[in-house]
Image (cartoon, coloured by chain):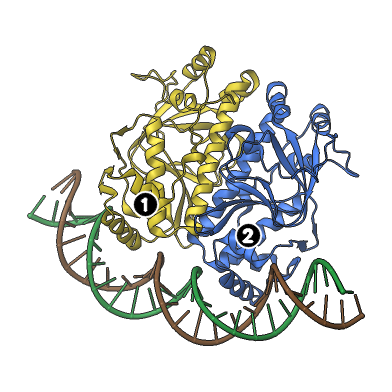
Chain colours: A blue, B yellow, C green, D brown
Amino acid sequence: MNHKTTKTRTPLATNGIHPLIPALERRDRLTAAEKQRIETLPWRVRPYEGGRQIIAEGSRPIESCLVLEGFTARSQTLRDGQRQLTAVHVPGDFVDLHGFLIKVMDHSVVAISRCKVGFVPHESIRQITEEMPHLARLLWTSTIIDAAIQRAWITSIGRRSALMQLAHLICELFKRLQIVGLTTGNSFVFPVSQAELGDMLGLSVVHTNRTLQELRATGTVNWQKPVVTIESWEGLAEIAEFDPTYLSLHHEPR
Amino acid sequence: MNHKTTKTRTPLATNGIHPLIPALERRDRLTAAEKQRIETLPWRVRPYEGGRQIIAEGSRPIESCLVLEGFTARSQTLRDGQRQLTAVHVPGDFVDLHGFLIKVMDHSVVAISRCKVGFVPHESIRQITEEMPHLARLLWTSTIIDAAIQRAWITSIGRRSALMQLAHLICELFKRLQIVGLTTGNSFVFPVSQAELGDMLGLSVVHTNRTLQELRATGTVNWQKPVVTIESWEGLAEIAEFDPTYLSLHHEPR
DNA sequence: CGAGGTCTTGAAGACGATCAACAAACGTGG
DNA sequence: CCACGTTTGTTGATCGTCTTCAAGACCTCG
């Protein structure tokens, strides 16, 4: 089980910048000391194949995880095997800050594509809350935005038609990936199966397939397996009734 | 608009204890200093009639609110007027800690019954994060549990049948009200209309009505307008596949 | 007592689920 | 590089859940 774990903890010496920094700086200014603290956190990095479980429901993790590359999701399963994904995470998302405070996981975290994940001890996060209140507020903010996204999903699943809902999800992903520089022009890479897409939308695979065709027929989106291209942002946002307010894409003191 | 606002800010000299304290103490120990800090926060208290808006979507509140009596909900509305409630709040819930960090509201907060709400300045909360890190973590925890509840709703709306979903909501409300001492035996007061119930479940009024009848027919619940009585907790939990883990009902250091 | 809101019921129809089968794409080993 | 097996995507047909529309009963409260 541990055979692929990188045992060494390193300050995430990525080629470029630390992926958490743009994600936080999108919402408020970080001081040099804060950036340095983030950069020197002791990370353990581990790759996952698509479909693998990263954190199990019911477990008591002692580390929180951050997506570095690829996509992960929160997953809940009913007795009959039906699965619902309650969130998708993109690189830069500090997915499991939740585990730091709830202690026992109410959901599992799974890889929905090949991905790379960083783990940092809860103790390090606790220290941040003790010593760097502003940075702590920014981490808190990231969990609050996460909750706002969940609310948008509730409204989508509860009240939007399958077509609107799919359009809304694509708008959301585009905006979120844009923040972390993972869009190229109007397109982005999103390597998930239609079954996984259905589990996000609360739809059956068959209906997901038909909805995707219906959306393609509107001419606003071109989804060719791993690449999603938005042909008309206005058209898509119109179908979805998309309003990005909930993503808190503004920069201000918090 | 301000005519009913209590202008004076007081340290919430309720007859009994401060409603926030049991809600937080259910999850971790509070020090005397922390309790005192909570008790001396400058509150502004205001009553609302059922159906009234408390905080508007798109607004920029400068205070956060706490439910003191009655029930409130988070609400989002689509262009065609369809409404989805994304959360229900019970007394002791620090509903709008979110506004403190997201700045612009992605949802509105409405009274779903006659209720009493306390408001505290964001600045006071900021001071807590600066000076009392442990108390700040407990407030953060309350928003994280809020998010866990939202995830349970996503899974319910996305994958559970109307009957299971309704049963699940009742189980959840019972547990949450129990924490704050608002259950009597197997029953609790929940004065909401079937239209509002439908808006929580993502169902039409008509189907909500039929689902309620179906649930009554199981003999597990007796819902007589304001009072909900659980005739068989085991039966109801079985229908709902209810597992209270997500409510973090355990007491531990955070 | 009347008026508006809430609950209830029936009937028809839409949206999405399920079942079943096949096609296409992908990955793996020979 | 091809053969093969497995996963993923696609299509048709049928079924069921939930929505919508409409109307009547009940209740509550001024």
For the C terminus of chain A, the quadrant is top right
Residue A156 got which mark? none
The reply, left or right, for residue B212 in relation to residue A12 is left
Residue B182, by quadrant, is top left
Q: Mark 1 points at which residue?
A: B197
Find residue B32 and report its horizontal and vertical position in percent.
Answer: 51, 12
With A179 as the anchor, is B199 left or right in this view? left
What amino acid is labelled 1 in the image? Leu
Q: Is residue A201 left or right of residue B178?
A: right
Q: Which residue is drawn at 63% across and 60% down?
A: A169
Identify which residue, B226 or A44, lies in the foreground: A44
Residue under the point 64% across and 33% down: A100
Q: B189 above or below D20?
A: above
Chain label for disc 2: A
The amino acid type, in three-letter code, at marker 2 is Leu
Q: Which residue has dot 2 on it?
A: A169
The answer to whether residue A61 shows anywhere in this view is: yes
Question: Which secondary structure, mark 1?
Answer: helix
